[in-house]
Image (tube, rainbow, N blue to C red):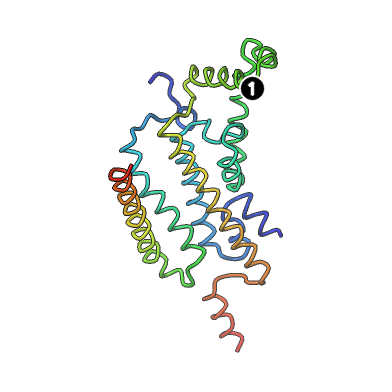
C-alpha cells in the first residue's frame, strides 16, 4: 500500500483477525469500570483480571450460542 | 460542575481534580488508548459526523480526543469537496447522488472505511466515549457528594485528626 499513513488511512484487516480485538476491548472496559468502582486500589489488578475474563468468556459464549442458533434455525 | 467539565474535556482530569490522581491517570491512558486504537484501525473517517450520527455522539464524550478527530475528519471532507470546484457541482445534485459522489471520492483517496474494519474501529472509538461518559458521571457524583481523595487517605487523615 503506497503512501499509507497511520491514523489517516484505514487498515485492511480480515474478519477473523478482527475477532481477536474483542480481548483488548474487554480489557479496556474492565480497566475503566473497575478503576472507578473499586474501593481499594490494591485490589484493582485482580478485579480487572476477573472482570476481563468474565467479559471475554461471556461474549464468546454469546457469540457461539448465536452462531449455533443461526446455523440450526435460519 | 468544574469536575464534570474537566472529566469531559480531558478523560481522567475530573478524577485528578478530585484528588484521585492514580485513577485519573489510568482513565486518561485507557480512554486515550481505546479511542486511538479505533482511529488507527479506521483512519481519519472513523469519527464521521455526517453518516454515523450515533457513533459520532458517543465519540464526542471522549472530549479532546473526539474534538481533534472531528476536526481532522471535517478538514479532509472539505478538502475532498472543494477539489476541482466539486462543491458547486454537488449543490446541483440530490442527496443520494451527492453521497454516491462523496463515497467515490473517499474510495479514490483510499479513505473509505468499509466492513468489517468499520464496525470494530467505530466500536473502539465509540466505546471509549461511553466509558468516559461513565467516568464523567462518577466525577460529577463524587463532586456533588463532596468526596475528595481516596477513601484510604480520608481514613488516615481522620486518624491523624483524633
Residue B105, percent across and down?
54, 17
- Is the residue B73 above or below the residue B130 in the image? above
**Residue at the extreme top of the image, as rendered:** B84
In the rendering, at what x and y percent does residue B32 appear?
51, 47
Q: Quadrant of the C terminus of chain A?
A: top left
Q: Which residue is mark 1?
A: B95
Label 1 secondary element: helix
Q: Residues within 10 Å of mark 1 (few under 14, many from 20)?
A: few
Q: Residue at x 46, y 27 (%)?
A: A9
The x and y percentages for residue A36 are 52, 63
**Residue sitting at x 58%, y 40%:** B56
> In the image shown, does B96 or B3 lie closer to the viewer?
B96
Q: Residue at x 63, y 52 (%)?
A: B8
Figure quadrant of residue B139: bottom right
Residue B18: image quadrant is bottom right
Question: Which quarter of the figure has residue B49?
Answer: top right
Q: Nearer the viewer, residue A71 or A49?
A: A71
Residue situated in front as seen by the camera: B126 or A5: B126
Query: Residue, x 46% and y 40% (percent of image)?
Result: B38
Q: Quadrant of the N terminus of chain A?
A: top left
Q: Position of residue B72 (x, y in %)?
A: 59, 31
Amino acid at each position: 500500500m503506497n503512501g499509507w499513513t497511520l491514523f489517516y488511512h484505514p487498515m485492511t484487516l480480515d474478519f477473523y483477525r478482527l475477532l481477536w480485538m474483542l480481548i483488548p476491548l474487554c480489557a479496556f472496559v474492565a480497566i475503566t469500570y473497575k478503576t472507578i468502582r473499586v474501593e481499594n486500589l490494591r485490589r484493582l489488578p485482580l478485579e480487572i483480571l476477573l472482570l476481563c475474563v468474565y467479559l471475554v468468556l461471556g461474549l464468546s459464549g454469546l457469540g457461539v450460542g448465536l452462531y449455533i442458533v443461526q446455523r440450526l434455525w435460519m | 460542575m468544574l469536575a464534570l467539565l474537566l472529566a469531559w474535556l480531558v478523560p481522567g482530569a475530573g478524577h485528578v481534580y478530585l484528588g484521585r490522581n492514580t485513577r485519573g491517570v489510568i482513565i486518561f491512558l485507557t480512554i486515550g488508548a481505546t479511542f486511538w486504537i479505533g482511529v488507527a484501525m479506521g483512519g481519519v473517517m472513523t469519527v464521521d459526523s455526517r453518516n454515523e450520527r450515533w457513533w459520532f455522539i458517543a465519540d464526542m464524550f471522549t472530549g479532546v480526543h473526539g474534538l481533534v478527530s472531528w476536526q481532522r475528519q471535517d478538514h479532509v471532507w472539505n478538502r475532498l469537496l472543494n477539489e476541482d470546484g466539486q462543491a458547486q457541482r454537488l449543490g446541483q445534485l440530490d442527496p443520494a447522488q451527492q453521497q454516491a459522489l462523496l463515497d467515490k471520492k473517499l474510495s479514490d483517496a483510499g479513505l473509505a472505511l468499509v466492513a468489517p474494519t468499520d464496525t470494530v474501529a467505530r466500536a473502539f472509538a465509540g466505546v471509549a466515549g461511553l466509558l468516559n461518559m461513565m467516568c464523567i458521571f462518577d466525577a460529577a457524583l463524587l463532586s456533588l457528594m463532596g468526596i475528595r481523595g481516596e477513601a484510604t487517605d480520608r481514613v488516615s487523615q481522620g486518624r491523624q485528626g483524633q
